[in-house]
Image: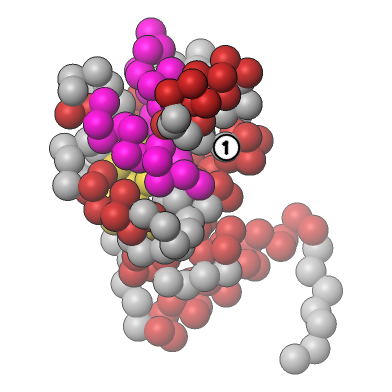
Amino acid sequence: MAFSEVRPADIEKKSFEIINDELAEMGKTVDPRYEHIVKRCIHTSADFEYADSLYFSEDVDSKISEAIRNGAFIVTDTTMAQSGINKKTIEFFGGRVLCFIGDKSVAEEAKERGMTRSFISMERASKLDRPVIVAVGNAPTALASIVRLHEEGKFDPVAVIGVPVGFVNVVEAKEMLMDTDIPCIVAKGRKGGSNIAACIINAIQYKIRREA
């Protein structure tokens, strides 16, 4: 395979053309309601399993889009996901992208209570005075915290992006989330990551901008 010269401005366009071609070759059909998200995840990871593994609760994309337009806060479980989210559209509508994982008070409380910082961070998210979308790309304990708080009537997020990656409690935490009535997007199985959490939020934002 020869190296081909592609203008920088055309790289993304060419990438999505390749993704479309390879999905067609595989005989995979992507739900048109969510193809902007699925294809963005494939573009971010070069992993075509996302065409099969992404779970979407009913109308979750519309609920997230509406919340962003209404100035919702996005809370992530890692600074990597926070950094990877394009802030322009969110801030245009009055929202913010927050992450509590590095807060000194979160670390202190987690140590005192014998909990993870991710767990405590979601408790902080539940106390925000704004609609909240949570994007989890690393910590299954963050999902466990969200589910527990929701069951206790203390947290009603607009939606949860549940895509932690790993081996310990990852699949179980994702299944816990899907068993609730919380609107969610989940990468079933072990795969995911902060980059995937960020790219899902970005894919929804790009669609908002296209529709504006």
Which residue is rendered at x = 17% and y = 47% of the image? 179
Does residue 205 lie above or below 194 as drawn?
above
Which residue is rendered at x = 63% and y = 40% of the image? 80
Query: On the picture, is 17 further left or further right than 201?
Result: right
Q: Is residue 62 visible?
A: no
Residue 3's spot in the image, x, y percent? Answer: 81, 82
Relative to the observer, which residue lies in front, 100 or 5?
100
Residue 79's spot in the image, x, y percent? Answer: 62, 35
Residue 132's spot in the image, x, y percent? Answer: 38, 23
Quarter of the figure with the N terminus: bottom right
Q: Is disc 1 placed on a helix, strand or loop?
A: loop
Which residue is rendered at x = 42% and y = 71% of the image? 49
Residue 126 painted magenta = yes
Q: Which residues are magenta?
A: 120-149
Relative to the observer, which residue lies in front, 31 or 186?
186
Query: On the picture, is 129 further left or further right than 44?
Result: left
Instruction: Tell me the residue that label 1 is attached to.
Output: 78
Residue 141 painted magenta = yes
Q: Amino acid at mark 1?
A: Thr
Quarter assignment of residue 6: bottom right
